[in-house]
Image (spheres, helix red, strand yellow):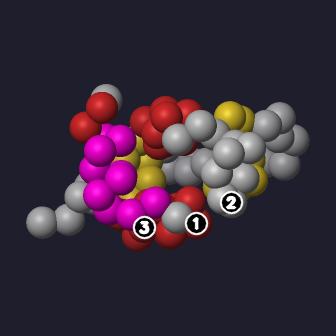
Amino acid sequence: MSAIPPQLPWRRFVCLLRDLGYRPLKSHRGSLRQFFCPTRSPNLVSFHEPHSGETLHKGTLNDCLRKLRVGPDEFAQLLGRR
């Protein structure tokens, strides 16, 4: 069974980023959101905030986790904390 849900609300995803140590940076570029964490690699990541329904779907979420270098097990632990 996959630890990645079929969809995840954007707000919850941002909370998970905070749990990983990322903090949002000011953004002036439409839906692009940047997050910074000095202790993780990569320390700067960017994502597009979804418009329709404000939900990340599984394919997009997989891409986000790959970009963050977070495995399914670590992701499941983060989801379990909330």
User: Judging from the image, what secondary structure is the residue with disc 3 in?
Assistant: helix
Residue bearing the label numbered 2: 42
Q: What is the number of callouts on the image?
A: 3
CA distance separating discs 3 and 2: 16 Å
Percent across and percent down for residue 81 are 30, 32
Q: Earlier in the sequence, mark 3 or mark 2?
A: 2
The answer to whether residue 46 is above or below residue 59 is above
Q: Residue at x 44, y 53 (%)?
A: 56
Q: Quadrant of residue 36?
A: top right
Furthest residue in direction right, as rendered: 28
**Disc nearer the start of the sequence (1/2):** 2
The answer to whether marks 3 and 2 mark residues whose Cβ atoms lie closer than 8 Å is no
- The residue lying at 63 percent from left, 40 percent from top is 22
Image mark for residue 62: 3
Q: Is residue 47 magenta?
A: no
Q: Does the magenta stretch mainly form a helix, a strand or a loop?
A: helix
Viewer-nearest of discs 1 and 2: 2
Quadrant including the C terminus? top left
Relative vertical location of residue 81 with respect to residue 74 in this rendering, above or below: above
In depth, the one of 32 and 75 nearer the eye is 75
Of residues 35 and 60, the one drawn nearer to the viewer in this rendering: 35
**Residue shown at 82%/40% (left/top)?**
27
